[in-house]
Image (spheres, rainbow, N blue to C red):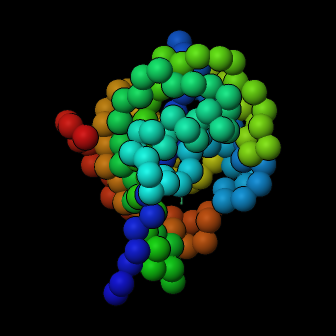
């Protein structure tokens, strides 16, 4: 089966015991709280794409990113495979601002609104918050149901 891969970024911005999430106001994932990210353009590296998307969507300029995960998403009946590179951002400049795409809000690590997020998040956030790197593959049916998944701890990414 011919699957095409599309590379996306997801930047998770953290400060002491709190995580910055954005409410997606339109487009893919509308109505869900998520990290900040999007497509990687042809003329940029994956981490350059992550820095660009974070600034476009939140106004924050990442000064240091750490690759912490790779998530693959496929949807029943759709040959496109989403390959999402997840980064942890703890050093950044600026204050988060609402943009056309995203309404940012800080959440305490023990108050993450999983019921208003992608269903995979509740599965890998606990690893992320413990500093464990991961690789996951999720088969979605529609945007709200995971039919099956694998999630593996990785020592290096
Ligand atoms: C299918 C899917 C896509 C993304 C995504 C696209 C761009 C950045 O992330 C997700 O992000 C999360 N947390 N679950 C996700 C599921």
Please say if 94 is above or below 143: above
Q: Is residue 97 left or right of residue 90?
A: right
Residue 152 in sight here: yes
Q: What is the residue that sits farthest to the front in this orientation?
A: 43
Please say if 151 is above or below 57: below
Dividing the picture into quarters, in which one does residue 131 lie? top left
Q: What is the residue that sits farthest to the top in this orientation?
A: 16
Find residue 66 and report its horizontal and vertical position in percent.
37, 29
**Residue at (49, 54) in percent of width and height:** 41
Please say if 87 is above or below 78: above
Q: Is residue 70 left or right of residue 30?
A: left
Please state which of residues 145 and 135 is positioned toward the viewer in this rendering: 135
**Residue at (51, 68) in percent of width and height:** 140
Quarter of the rendering occupied by the C terminus: top left
Please state which of residues 131 and 58 is positioned toward the viewer in this rendering: 58
Quarter of the rendering occupied by the N terminus: bottom left
Q: What is the residue that sits farthest to the left in this orientation?
A: 155
Q: How many marks?
A: 0
Find residue 9 and report its horizontal and vertical position in percent.
48, 47
Find residue 132 and report its horizontal and vertical position in percent.
31, 32
**Residue at (20, 36) in percent of width and height:** 155
**Residue at (67, 38) in percent of width and height:** 57
Please state which of residues 154 and 4 is positioned toward the viewer in this rendering: 4
Find residue 145 and report its horizontal and vertical position in percent.
57, 66
Residue 73 in sight here: no
Q: Is residue 95 left or right of residue 18?
A: right
């Amino acid at each position: 089966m011919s699957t095409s891969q599309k590379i996306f970024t997801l930047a998770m911005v953290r400060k002491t015991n709190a995580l910055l999430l954005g409410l997606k106001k339109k487009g893919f994932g509308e109505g869900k709280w998520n990290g900040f990210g999007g497509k990687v353009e042809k003329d940029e590296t994956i981490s350059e794409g992550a820095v660009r998307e974070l600034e476009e969507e939140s106004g924050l300029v990442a000064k240091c990113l750490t690759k912490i995960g790779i998530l693959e998403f496929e949807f029943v009946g759709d040959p496109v495979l989403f390959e999402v590179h997840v980064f942890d951002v703890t050093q950044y400049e600026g204050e988060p601002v609402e943009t056309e795409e995203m309404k940012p809000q800080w959440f305490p690590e023990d108050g993450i609104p999983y019921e208003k997020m992608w269903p995979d998040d509740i599965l890998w956030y606990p690893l992320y918050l413990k500093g464990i790197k991961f690789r996951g593959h999720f088969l979605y049916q529609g945007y709200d149901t995971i039919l099956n998944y694998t999630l593996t701890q990785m020592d290096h990414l």
